[in-house]
Amino acid sequence: MGFGENLKAHRTRAGLSQEALGRSCRLHRTEISLLERGERDPRLSTIVRLARCLEVPPAALLDEVEDA
Amino acid sequence: MGFGENLKAHRTRAGLSQEALGRSCRLHRTEISLLERGERDPRLSTIVRLARCLEVPPAALLDEVEDA
Protein backbone atom coordinates (compact mmCIF):
# COMPACT_ATOMS: atom_id res chain seq x y z
CA MET A 1 0.00 0.00 0.00
CA GLY A 2 1.32 3.40 -0.92
CA PHE A 3 0.42 7.02 -0.58
CA GLY A 4 -0.61 7.13 -4.24
CA GLU A 5 -3.08 4.28 -3.83
CA ASN A 6 -4.59 5.98 -0.79
CA LEU A 7 -4.86 9.24 -2.69
CA LYS A 8 -6.59 7.55 -5.61
CA ALA A 9 -8.95 5.62 -3.31
CA HIS A 10 -10.01 8.75 -1.45
CA ARG A 11 -10.33 10.75 -4.67
CA THR A 12 -12.57 8.19 -6.34
CA ARG A 13 -14.59 7.76 -3.13
CA ALA A 14 -15.16 11.52 -3.25
CA GLY A 15 -16.37 11.14 -6.83
CA LEU A 16 -13.67 13.46 -8.16
CA SER A 17 -11.69 13.17 -11.37
CA GLN A 18 -7.95 13.91 -11.25
CA GLU A 19 -8.79 17.16 -13.00
CA ALA A 20 -11.46 18.15 -10.48
CA LEU A 21 -9.20 17.39 -7.52
CA GLY A 22 -6.39 19.30 -9.19
CA ARG A 23 -8.65 22.29 -9.66
CA SER A 24 -9.83 22.35 -6.06
CA CYS A 25 -6.27 21.89 -4.77
CA ARG A 26 -4.60 24.13 -7.32
CA LEU A 27 -2.37 21.31 -8.53
CA HIS A 28 -2.05 20.28 -12.15
CA ARG A 29 -3.91 17.15 -13.19
CA THR A 30 -0.63 15.59 -14.28
CA GLU A 31 0.77 16.22 -10.80
CA ILE A 32 -2.19 14.31 -9.30
CA SER A 33 -1.53 11.52 -11.78
CA LEU A 34 2.17 11.35 -10.87
CA LEU A 35 1.36 11.35 -7.16
CA GLU A 36 -1.13 8.51 -7.59
CA ARG A 37 1.44 6.47 -9.50
CA GLY A 38 4.05 7.00 -6.81
CA GLU A 39 6.24 9.01 -9.11
CA ARG A 40 6.40 12.04 -6.84
CA ASP A 41 7.73 12.41 -3.29
CA PRO A 42 5.29 15.03 -1.97
CA ARG A 43 6.05 17.44 0.83
CA LEU A 44 3.99 17.40 4.03
CA SER A 45 2.29 20.66 3.01
CA THR A 46 1.09 19.04 -0.23
CA ILE A 47 -0.18 15.96 1.63
CA VAL A 48 -2.10 18.22 4.02
CA ARG A 49 -3.48 20.29 1.14
CA LEU A 50 -4.72 17.21 -0.71
CA ALA A 51 -6.29 15.83 2.47
CA ARG A 52 -8.13 19.09 3.03
CA CYS A 53 -9.48 19.05 -0.54
CA LEU A 54 -10.64 15.47 -0.01
CA GLU A 55 -12.06 16.23 3.44
CA VAL A 56 -10.09 13.46 5.12
CA PRO A 57 -7.48 13.70 7.90
CA PRO A 58 -3.93 13.91 6.49
CA ALA A 59 -3.08 10.68 8.33
CA ALA A 60 -5.67 8.86 6.17
CA LEU A 61 -3.45 9.39 3.14
CA LEU A 62 -0.60 7.58 4.93
CA ASP A 63 -2.76 4.72 6.12
CA GLU A 64 -0.81 1.45 5.77
CA VAL A 65 2.00 3.25 3.98
CA GLU A 66 5.24 1.46 4.71
CA ASP A 67 7.59 2.61 1.97
CA ALA A 68 8.17 5.76 -0.02
CA MET B 1 -1.10 19.56 16.77
CA GLY B 2 1.60 19.41 14.18
CA PHE B 3 3.94 16.91 12.60
CA GLY B 4 6.81 18.30 14.68
CA GLU B 5 5.01 17.73 17.95
CA ASN B 6 4.17 14.17 16.92
CA LEU B 7 7.78 13.57 15.95
CA LYS B 8 9.04 14.88 19.27
CA ALA B 9 6.44 12.89 21.23
CA HIS B 10 7.37 9.62 19.51
CA ARG B 11 11.09 10.34 19.78
CA THR B 12 10.95 11.02 23.51
CA ARG B 13 8.66 8.00 24.01
CA ALA B 14 11.35 5.92 22.31
CA GLY B 15 13.90 7.35 24.75
CA LEU B 16 15.98 8.84 21.94
CA SER B 17 17.80 12.16 21.86
CA GLN B 18 17.62 14.25 18.69
CA GLU B 19 21.18 13.20 18.07
CA ALA B 20 20.45 9.48 18.50
CA LEU B 21 17.43 9.66 16.18
CA GLY B 22 19.46 11.59 13.65
CA ARG B 23 22.19 8.96 13.76
CA SER B 24 19.79 6.06 13.23
CA CYS B 25 17.99 7.92 10.42
CA ARG B 26 21.06 9.46 8.87
CA LEU B 27 19.69 12.97 9.34
CA HIS B 28 21.59 15.75 11.06
CA ARG B 29 20.55 16.57 14.62
CA THR B 30 19.76 20.13 13.55
CA GLU B 31 17.43 18.76 10.87
CA ILE B 32 15.54 16.80 13.56
CA SER B 33 15.36 19.97 15.62
CA LEU B 34 14.01 22.02 12.69
CA LEU B 35 11.44 19.32 11.88
CA GLU B 36 10.25 19.23 15.50
CA ARG B 37 9.87 23.01 15.52
CA GLY B 38 7.84 22.94 12.32
CA GLU B 39 10.51 24.81 10.42
CA ARG B 40 10.85 22.20 7.71
CA ASP B 41 8.33 20.86 5.21
CA PRO B 42 9.52 17.24 4.96
CA ARG B 43 8.97 15.01 1.98
CA LEU B 44 6.96 11.81 2.29
CA SER B 45 10.15 9.73 2.04
CA THR B 46 11.61 11.56 5.05
CA ILE B 47 8.40 11.07 7.06
CA VAL B 48 8.48 7.35 6.26
CA ARG B 49 12.19 7.11 7.13
CA LEU B 50 11.66 8.80 10.50
CA ALA B 51 8.68 6.56 11.26
CA ARG B 52 10.74 3.48 10.49
CA CYS B 53 13.52 4.65 12.82
CA LEU B 54 10.92 5.25 15.53
CA GLU B 55 9.16 1.93 14.84
CA VAL B 56 5.77 3.58 14.38
CA PRO B 57 3.50 3.61 11.31
CA PRO B 58 4.10 6.69 9.13
CA ALA B 59 0.45 7.72 9.69
CA ALA B 60 1.21 8.06 13.43
CA LEU B 61 3.42 11.07 12.66
CA LEU B 62 0.46 12.79 10.97
CA ASP B 63 -1.98 11.98 13.75
CA GLU B 64 -4.22 15.01 14.35
CA VAL B 65 -2.16 17.09 11.94
CA GLU B 66 -4.42 19.67 10.34
CA ASP B 67 -2.02 22.30 9.02
CA ALA B 68 1.43 22.36 7.50
Image (tube, coloured by chain):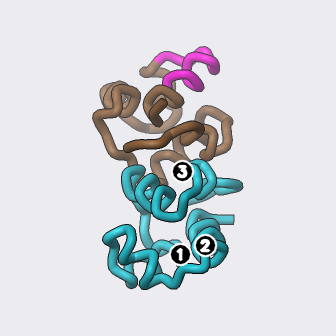
Chain colours: A brown, B cyan
Three-letter amino acid code at the position of disc 2:
Ala
Q: Nearer the viewer, residue A15 or B62?
A: B62
The answer to whether marks 2 and 3 sit on the same chain is yes
Q: Which mark is residue B14?
A: 2
Residue A26: x, y in percent?
Answer: 44, 38
Q: Which mark is first along the chain, 3 or 2?
A: 2
Q: CA distance from mark 2 to mark 3?
A: 15 Å
Q: CA distance from mark 1 to mark 3?
A: 15 Å
Tell whether A34 sits left or right of B61: left
The answer to whether marks 1 and 3 sit on the same chain is yes
Three-letter amino acid code at the position of disc 1:
Glu
Circle 3 packing at 10 Å, graded few (<14), some (14-19), many (20+), is many
Q: What is the quadrant of residue B19 in the picture?
A: bottom left
Tell whether A10 sits left or right of A55: left
Q: CA distance from mark 1 to mark 2?
A: 15 Å
Residue A14: x, y in percent?
Answer: 63, 20
- In this view of the protein, can residue A64 be seen by the observer? yes
Chain name for mark 2 = B
- Find disc 1 in the rendering and name its residue: B36
Mark 1–mark 3 contact, CB under 8 Å? no
Residue A16 covered by magenta stretch: yes
Question: For the residue labelled by badge 3, is the local secondary structure a helix, a strand or a loop?
Answer: helix
Q: Which mark is residue B58?
A: 3
Residue A1 covered by magenta stretch: no
Q: Is residue A15 placed above or below B17 in the rendered structure?
A: above
Q: What is the quadrant of residue B64 in the picture?
A: bottom right
Mark 2–mark 3 contact, CB under 8 Å? no
Which region is colored magenta?
A: A8-17
Three-letter amino acid code at the position of disc 3:
Pro
User: From the image, which quarter does the C terminus of chain A lie in?
Assistant: top left
